[in-house]
Amino acid sequence: MNTPNPLRNIRQDIQSMHAYAIQDSAGMVKLDAMENPFALPPELQKALGERLGTVAINRYPGARIEDLKRALARYVDLPDGCALMLGNGSDELISLLAMGCDVSGASILAPQPGFVMYAMSAQLQGLTFHGVPLTADFELDEAAMLAALREHRPTITYLAYPNNPTANLWDAAVIRRLIAEAAAFGGLVVMDEAYQPFSSRSWLEEIRAEPTANAHVLLMRTLSKFGLAGVRLGYMVGLQALVHEIDKLRPPYNVSALNAESALFALEHADVFDQQAATIRAERERLIAALADMPGVRPFPSQANMVLVRVPDAQKAFDGLKARSVLVKNVSKMHPLLGNCLRLTVGTPDENTQMIAALQSSL
Ligand SMILES: *Cc1c(COP(=O)(O)O)cnc(C)c1O
């Protein structure tokens, strides 16, 4: 008797997908994933260990989740009329949004190249994704974006501020006009501020100044690039009525008691993380200057903890860096606009010095 293949129960489109690839980084200088390169200072490691030791891990996460929401609301100075919800990383929030916004005819739109999870969340939910190319220097193509908004009337438009992998902040005046266009047909706009600690601007100021024009805007952030990538904590801010609906999609205990306690601890020591972010911003400028001095190498402007750089031969440079134990991300095949581009995460001063030397030898 033939037993039916159990894989027949798995969606065909899932079976055709590639799993999210994580590069092996053992023994490498790891500059591929926009992680904060600084470990907690030893005295804080000890204090955190003691704190986590007291967490009631036999209980489901409880009141500390509300404490964390209050601490984050204070941290962002939550605008009037807004609420805040938590995700297991902002990746989870992106998935929940796709699920919750799966109304009839729904679609998701984002500029490209952009963060892969926007398109992925659409695909997994069975929604159409509309990618609109950026210009050759990675600015928003306003005419193309406006035309796409009018044509597709997407349920959700994602704007990463700053963008990944290009690292730049787009023109606020252009974004304002895109947000107004989405308002005209009743679409949502998500401002994804994963890189906020390294950016000179935040859309939160805009929301505070122009609440009515931004009533359909959700602002998403994460503690990952701040320094807690291992903890998994994202959050989203928007009008109470909107956030309360999206919050219903959340699995009841999506943020663990250990995650919440770690995040609370980090916010109590926000000054330590602010110092680290300041060092990273200064190192970013040093890295950009060193890259600009290399023949045939073009770094693009960055407001994040990464630098997108075009080199004469991305594969050769990537392989050369890897042979010298420096792991970066080769994004050159991700999108036609990214030809021969590498994405370098800003590391510690020593790591950056090592990366610069390794790149010089690899060109
Ligand atoms: C890293 C990143 C995220 C996801 O962050 P997590 O909170 O770790 O899931 C979201 N958006 C952008 C643009 C990112 O680069």
Image (cartoon, helix red, strand yellow):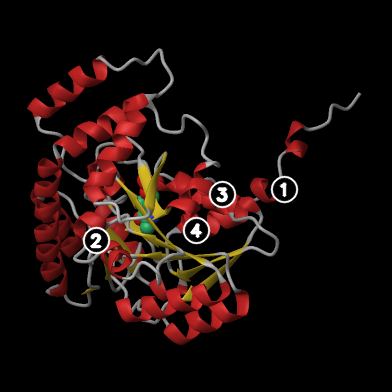
Q: Measure how far apart labels 3 and 4 are at the Cα level.
A: 16 Å
Q: Which residue is mark 2?
A: 304
Vertical arrangement, residue 2 with respect to residue 356, above or below: above
Q: How far from the left and from the top, in percent, is residue 116?
A: 47, 58
Residue 327 makes an appearance in the image? yes
Q: Measure how far apart labels 1 and 4 are at the Cα level.
A: 20 Å
Q: Which residue is mark 3?
A: 18
Q: Which residue is mark 1?
A: 12
Residue 345 makes an appearance in the image? no
* Front label number (3 vs 4): 4
Whether ligand 1 has any atom under 8 Å from the Cβ at mark 2 is answered as no
Q: Measure how far apart labels 4 and 2 are at the Cα level.
A: 19 Å
Q: Are marks 4 and 2 in contact (CB under 8 Å)?
A: no
Relative placement, left or right, of 206 versus 50 is right
Where disc 2 sits, the SS reads loop
Count of numbered tags: 4
Reading the chain from its start, which is encountered first: label 1 or label 4?
A: 1
* Front label number (3 vs 2): 2
Q: Which residue is mark 4?
A: 118
Pick the front one: 358 or 285: 285
Where disc 3 sits, the SS reads loop
Q: Measure how far apart labels 2 and 1 are at the Cα level.
A: 37 Å
Q: Amino acid at mark 1?
A: Gln
